[in-house]
Amino acid sequence: MNFEWPALPDSFWYYVAFAYGAIVGSFLNVVIYRLPLGKHLSKPASHCPNCNHIITFWENIPLLSFLFLRARCSDCKDPISWRYFCVELFTACFWTLLYHSIVLPYQPLTTCNFIFTALIAALLIALVFIDLDHFLAPDELTWFIVALGLGRDLACGVIAVSQHEWTRFSQDFLYFGWLPVSLVGAACYGGLLFLVSFVGFIVYARQPGESLPQIIRRFFIEESPLETTTEKGMALVGADKSPEEPNSEDSTNTPPRLALSPLFLTSLSFLAMAPMFPLWAALFLVIPLAAFFVMTRRSDETPLATLLRFGRSDDLGLPASANAEIAAAAAEADEFAREAETGQHGAMGLGDVKLALGLGAILGPGMAILSLVFATFLGAVVGGGLALLRGRNMKYGVPFVPFMAAGAMIVMCFGPQMVESCKKLAFPQKEDTLHLEVRSPRARRRMGLPPLKPGQ
């Protein structure tokens, strides 16, 4: 007697994607906190930074433990940053949206594509917070994204051969039947941002008296800027700075820094779930808001003030009770931000270029350029808005990784639909003709068109 497991409904895999996303989000919090400080990711075990209480298994259940502990350490009652909960929630919601956008209807190739894309999305979330905190895009993460982007095509190719899906694979992942989409995308996106970084460094970071070969050398090996000596024997770096520009010696002149609030992250979680569960998506915003109100309201605070604090980043930063390494890292990031406003670091770092290689590999050239359009637009809006609100020069002081990540994540979920909608507007066709001319199975699935019949 042969027994076959019953087919699981699609809704079951939504729950699986959400659960795994929350688990990965919990690990991302460790990466965000430890990696920039040079700490080992698994040793010592997770502990409270204030009292060193070792986090037990039941205290480390994604999302639920945070709510059960009322956002406080079970031992010393020190507050736990709301970043932990928000990162877990958003990662879980975004993985669910990715599953909905990429996998359905189920195919081995789409499942493989989803796994690699979801892992890259998780690394992007970690990079966003690290860049906001430290103005840093660690090579460990950017090169891992490159490896995943290139490895996706290789893994899908192996599956295509074993499952006799080579025709579908060649349509979705190859150009001319032999050139991987990932290589072309990495070359286009990475090459474009390298050019921007190189030219921007020469234009903005060049010091008086520095020759072109010297500035090019400094771009590649990160030497200190050329020093020029005055008649009094004083060494000056960047002698063309005006007195009005920020002085790096002035520790009180802290430049404005981008930060994310619990309201912003839970709103993104709501937006991620809305396409799939429009009637229930609001819970992903309402429940965190209610929990925040109950757990963090102060005795001397009005209800409105508590709700307004949910929209600020007060409770979303690095743990205030941590050791001096946190304070030193924050001071170093502030110093970098002050220097960036003068343009001495150029227009874009090489960390952004490495990230572009990985994003280009996973998205392909067309979608990568579309993501860059979104990233540039969002960066211009946010940077310009900060400049108007703060009255400062934000031209060079805004980290670009968060906007690259935002553009990539938008395109991961909605890029093909956007492109097809634009094609319909630009080149309207009769419905029957359109059904036959869109021959890519992947594009037809995204557009909701029926599969082509043999001979069509």
Image (cartoon, rainbow, N blue to C red):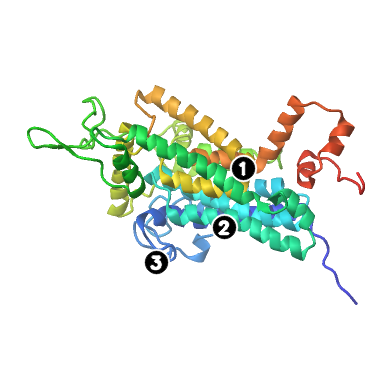
Q: Earlier in the sequence, mark 1 or mark 3?
A: 3
Label 3: which residue?
Answer: 44
Quadrant in which the N terminus is drawn: bottom right
Q: Position of residue 92 (x, y in %)?
A: 60, 50
Q: Is residue 229 above or below residue 139?
A: above
Can you name the residue that lies furthest to the bottom here? 1
Q: Amino acid at mark 1?
A: Pro
Q: Secondary structure at mark 1?
A: helix
**Residue 365 shows which numbered tag?**
1
Q: Secondary structure at mark 2?
A: helix
Dot 2 alpha-carbon crowd within 10 angstroms: few under 14, some 14 to 19, many 20 or more: some
Q: Residue 313 lies in what quarter of the image?
A: top left
Taking the spot 50% from the left edge, 47% from the top edge, the residue there is: 355
- Foreground mark, 1 or 2, reads 1
Residue 80 placement, left or right of 166: left
Q: Visible in this render: residue 313?
A: no
The foreground one among 331 and 26 is 331
Taking the spot 69% from the left edge, 51% from the top edge, the residue there is: 173
Q: Is residue 244 above or below residue 21?
A: above
Dot 1 alpha-carbon crowd within 10 angstroms: few under 14, some 14 to 19, many 20 or more: many
Q: Visible in this render: residue 376?
A: yes
Q: Position of residue 77 (x, y in %)?
A: 39, 54
Q: State yes or no: discs 3 and 2 in contact (Cβ < 8 Å).
A: no
Taking the spot 43% from the left edge, 62% from the top edge, the residue there is: 41
Q: CA distance from mark 1 to mark 2?
A: 31 Å
Label 2: which residue?
Answer: 23
